[in-house]
């Protein structure tokens, strides 16, 4: 083809027209709201010059059944393509709010569906950068059908490739369901919000005044609903966080996560681990200190930090290998298990299991949270989610009991009989059916009632209970714990144990799927 010829000229003109579309005025509109443009977001996400766009020239269909005006634009309000993130293949789409509010019409939906199908076929992660007013009103039912296709694809890809969503503006109506069907959702504070029905509908139906931020801002979803797993103060940091997060994940369910060996390796024995758990069993401490000391330097990436903080979950590296950590947090509600923490833990465990990420459990839990509220809201079925998730997971699973391990919580937190591969305990561990106070009150009710000095008797019995029952040595002697270990050696023990489990293979009964209590 002659590059000065007519066809080449048309090819170049077309490119110019596409460029003109992302004009300064549109960029200004986005920037004035503290947001980046769809192109700027894509540029930040992908390695230099690695992004390849597809379907840049598609335009919305002239529909026989449309209502109102449809803005003719190249790309129909969404950029889609693939490129490299930290050198690895990733697929992505970014909605452009400046084109009909990033709303989803037929062609827009087809583009997203196409990129989803490509990501699945290639076994590469997919990222959705969402900035959308939901189903395009003008295109009616065809837009709803478009969402259905996207959701169906999300569900088909679930557990096969990592799917991540980043909310960078509104995610209204249909736009909210794709993110929650994906594995993790990131949000930017103050500029992003998610709701099924917006403030106007709330006002109309319930006569309640509420702002978008109050209804579905990043803080609300990070702290209250648990819909947002990670939040950041601006878009740049959101994308940087997302890129770091990706480095912990494999590209798909048949690969392992990348191994990242540190230049300056931590020692294997860490004496300060002996000083974290206080002598007083009722004194709180921060389990994140334990995590930080055990794992490779600064490698802990917490997930859902602000939701159900009584359970800490996140990814880290141990000797360069990604692990998923689930840890009770004695600093928050004494680390008790409740409905929200059970759901948070169960979902995280299932992600790790789907993507070959070994699980480390750090246990210090007094039990399930008692009370009418929890019982009436279904702690029985929600607590069972965690039980189910741990038990069905076939990845390597190790538990270290740091301190309390009582009752149902002992069983749930990856106990030996539930399928724990290695179960260790620190000498500070207290393992029993229930805590000393409760046990003594039940077994010695009559004696305590008749005693001359009930407090002294109780103190005596509690001490005896700790010596005779609630310690790790009995569990060790009976094989319910594989070894009581010196806390200082925990990192070394874990590296060796996970290495031994590298080729773990288990056979599960043939079935369509289990029936997790939802
Ligand atoms: C078509 C839309 C649109 C939509 C916004 N726009 N949402 N066009 N379909 N769903 C257009 C506006 O007409 C406007 O066009 C431009 O996008 C910018 O919108 P503004 O309202 O000016 O912006 P802003 O004030 O920032 O408000 C953003 C917004 C608001 C909060 C998203 O636009 C809004 O409430 N939109 C509707 C949200 C919604 O209810 N979606 C649900 C759809 S139903 P111009 O030409 O003026 O620039 C749905 C079904 C699935 O999704 C439900 C499953 C649960």
Image (cartoon, rainbow, N blue to C red):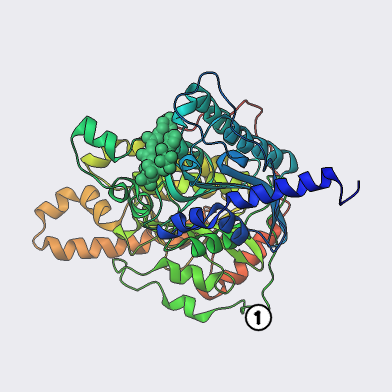
Q: Residue at x 39, y 58 (%)?
A: 189
Count of marks overlaid on the render? 1
The residue lying toward the viewer, choosing from 356 and 269, is 356
Q: Residue at x 68, y 62 (%)?
A: 47
Structural crowding at the residue carrying mark 1, measured as other residues with C-alpha within 10 Å and reported as few (<14), some (14–19) or many (≥20) = few
Residue 308 as seen in the image, left or right of residue 4: left
Residue 232 as seen in the image, left or right of residue 279: right
| Residue 205 visible to the viewer | yes
Q: Is the residue marked 1 within 8 Å of ligand 1, measured from its CB?
A: no
Q: Residue at x 21, y 52 (%)?
A: 441
Report x, y in % for residue 363: 44, 58
Report x, y in % for residue 377: 28, 36
Q: Residue at x 72, y 58 (%)?
A: 50
Report x, y in % for residue 405: 40, 55
Vertical position of residue 381 compared to residue 369: above or below: above
Task: Look at the image and tell me in which quarter the C terminus lies.
Answer: top left
Report x, y in % for residue 91: 66, 48
What residue is disc 1 on? 264
Vertical position of residue 336 compared to residue 292: above or below: above
Which residue is outermost to the right? Answer: 1
Q: Secondary structure at mark 1?
A: loop
Vertical position of residue 267 compared to residue 108: above or below: below
Which image quadrant is residue 33 in? bottom left
The residue lying toward the viewer, choosing from 93 and 306, is 93
Residue 159 as seen in the image, left or right of residue 290: right
Residue 257 as seen in the image, left or right of residue 451: right
Which image quadrant is residue 240 in? bottom right
| Quarter of image, ligand 1 | top left
The residue lying toward the viewer, choosing from 5 and 53, is 5
| Residue 408 visible to the viewer | no
């Amino acid at each position: 083809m002659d590059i000065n010829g007519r066809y080449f000229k048309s090819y170049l003109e077309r490119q110019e027209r596409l460029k003109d579309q992302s004009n300064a005025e549109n960029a200004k509109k986005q920037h004035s709201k503290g947001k980046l443009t769809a192109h700027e977001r894509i540029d930040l996400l992908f390695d230099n010059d690695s992004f390849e766009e597809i379907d840049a020239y598609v335009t919305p269909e002239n529909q026989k059944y449309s209502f109102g005006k449809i803005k003719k634009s190249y790309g129909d309000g969404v950029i889609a393509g693939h490129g490299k993130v930290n050198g690895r293949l990733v697929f992505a789409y970014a909605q452009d709010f400046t084109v009909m509010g990033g709303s989803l019409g037929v062609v827009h939906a087809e583009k997203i569906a196409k990129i989803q199908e490509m990501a699945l076929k290639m076994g590469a992660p997919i990222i959705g950068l969402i900035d959308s007013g939901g189903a395009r009103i003008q295109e009616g039912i065809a837009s709803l059908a478009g969402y259905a296709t996207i959701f169906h694809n999300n569900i088909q890809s679930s557990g096969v490739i990592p799917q991540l969503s980043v909310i960078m503006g509104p995610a209204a109506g249909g736009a909210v369901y794709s993110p929650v069907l994906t594995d993790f959702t990131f949000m930017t504070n103050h500029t992003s919000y998610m709701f099924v029905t917006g403030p106007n509908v709330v006002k109309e139906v319930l006569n309640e005044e509420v702002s978008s931020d109050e209804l579905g801002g990043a803080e609300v979803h990070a702290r209250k609903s648990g819909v947002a797993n990670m939040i950041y103060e601006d878009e740049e940091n959101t994308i940087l966080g997302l890129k770091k997060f990706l480095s912990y994940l494999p590209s798909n369910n048949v690969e392992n996560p990348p191994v990242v060996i540190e230049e300056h390796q931590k020692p294997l024995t860490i004496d300060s681990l002996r000083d974290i758990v206080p002598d007083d069993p009722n004194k709180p401490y921060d389990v994140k200190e334990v995590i930080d000391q055990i794992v490779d330097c600064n490698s802990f990436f917490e997930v859902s930090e602000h939701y159900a903080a009584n359970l800490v979950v996140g990814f880290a590296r141990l000797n360069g290998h990604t692990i998923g950590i689930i840890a009770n947090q004695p600093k928050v509600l004494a680390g008790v298990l409740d409905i929200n923490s059970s759901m948070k833990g169960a979902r995280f465990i299932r992600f790790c299991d789907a993507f070959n990420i070994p699980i480390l459990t750090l246990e210090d839990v007094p039990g399930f949270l008692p009370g009418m509220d929890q019982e009436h809201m279904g702690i029985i079925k929600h607590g069972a989610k965690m039980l189910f998730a741990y038990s069905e997971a076939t990845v390597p699973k190790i538990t270290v009991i740091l301190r309390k391990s009582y009752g149902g919580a002992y069983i749930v937190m990856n106990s030996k009989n539930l399928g724990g591969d290695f179960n260790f305990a620190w000498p500070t561990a207290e393992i029993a059916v229930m805590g000393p106070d409760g046990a003594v009150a039940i077994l010695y009710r009559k004696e305590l009632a008749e005693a001359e000095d009930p407090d002294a008797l109780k103190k005596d019995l509690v001490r005896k209970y700790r010596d005779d029952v609630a310690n790790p040595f009995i569990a060790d002697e009976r094989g319910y714990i594989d070894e009581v270990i010196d806390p200082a050696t925990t990192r070394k023990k874990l590296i060796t144990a996970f290495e031994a489990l590298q080729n773990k293979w288990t056979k599960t009964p043939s079935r369509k799927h289990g029936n997790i209590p939802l």
